[in-house]
Amino acid sequence: MDTNKKHITILGSTGSIGLNSLSVIDSLGDDYELISAGAHRNWQVLADQAVKYSLRKVVLTDPTHLTNLKEALKHSDTEVLSGPQGLVDLAVDPLLDVVIVAVVGAAGLPAVLAATEAGKTVAIANKESLVCAGSLVMPMAQRCGATILPIDSEHSAILQAMHSGNRTEVKKVIITCSGGPFRTASSEEIAQATLADALNHPTWNMGPKITIDSATMMNKALEIIEARWLFDLAPDQIEVLIHPESVIHSMVEFCDGSVIAQMSSPDMRLPIQYALTYPNRAPGPSRRLNLRELGQLTFEPPDMERFPAIRLGFEVARQGGAAGAVLNGANEAAVEAFRAGEIGFAQITELAEHCLNNHNQLENPDLHQLMQADQWACDEVKRCIKNFQGARNT
């Protein structure tokens, strides 16, 4: 293999972030090469990617369609792996330089830890990894010489803005938020929201889980926790502002009063590319920002009565321990239940808060304990829903 190239794997290559990552890799040219990829169950798209990019290895974590994938690639040189361990195997490939982690939920955590321990550059779209285990990932990165880079727009913006000063000069970071589909809705309207309402995001085109998280503003809660670990911040150094134009993706305020903002069109390809070319920049495919057409920039504080998830994010950032894993597990299970029609929209955050209020706090949990906390919260949400449905049917 060409040692002058930057070799990349995408874990979650068939989803929104994965497809945008491929668009970026295609635009960057011959210096960047995709050598492997993993997906959950979309075997047809994964097979097409394997052929197009002559991939060395692919992983399908859901074994249901593994036979179909192997059949589709039987005349190729691509090695087909399966199961969650396959993602770990891709992440620690000695030929690999950059691991893009776009797997939804805590499922991406083992691969993040493995890649970090192997000293890779880990580009994380999977914020749950740092939410659940930032206390493990970031110290490990320092020990092992790994580089952890965010590829969500908010944390990429913070990273870019921080280059305007020294880390010790940072007073606070300001994470912006579009406000989602219910920014101007009343509490009653939010409580009655349907799945179609929640998926109707005004700005971003994302997968269903992330879009629902944006509607509850749980995504902002997770970003608060992620920022706490990624940039080694105290909770009172983090602020959230609603910014419906979604042009300023986040800001950094320095000790002298200067506020540096990163601005761009809402296009995920830009933060993805910045992670791939970091610390340099290159021409890319993302949409350009036209300030003449922009008109105005508006900001407003978040309403934590209508969107209590933001409050939960700050509580978890203060608590530390296993609280992040609990919030993540509870939210994943509640969002799944909402998508299945088992609970109402408002119950997503209510169930997450219930789990936070009733879990056993651990000060310095290891990975096994964090995964147990995540699973406990998932099970607790299911138990609560089952009890609620049983009471309703009696």
Image (cartoon, rainbow, N blue to C red):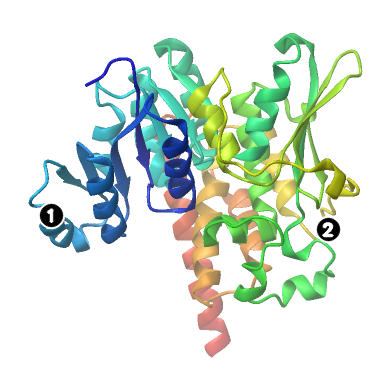
Q: Where in the figure is residue 54, as x and y percent of width and height?
A: 22, 40
Q: Which mark is residue 305?
A: 2
| Nearest to N terminus: mark 1 or mark 2 | 1
Q: Secondary structure at mark 2?
A: loop
Quote the CA–CA distance across marks 1 and 2.
51 Å
- 353, above or below 182, in the image: above
x, y percent for residue 304: 82, 53
Q: Quadrant of residue 145?
A: top left
Residue 350: tell me if it is visible: yes
Q: Secondary structure at mark 1?
A: helix
Query: Residue lying farthest left?
Result: 75
Q: What residue sits 37% from the left and 17% below the top?
A: 119
How many C-alpha atoms fall within 10 Å of the one at disc 1: few (<14), some, or many (≥20)? some
Q: Residue at x 70, y 44 (%)?
A: 265
Tell me whether the residue at label 1 lies in contact with that at label 2, contact meaning CB atoms closer than 8 angstroms: no
Amino acid carrying label 2: it is Glu
Q: Quadrant of the N terminus?
A: top left
Q: Is residue 22 left or right of residue 193?
A: left
Q: Which mark is residue 70?
A: 1
Of marks 1 and 2, the one in the foreground: 1
**Residue 81 x, y percent position in the rendering:** 18, 44
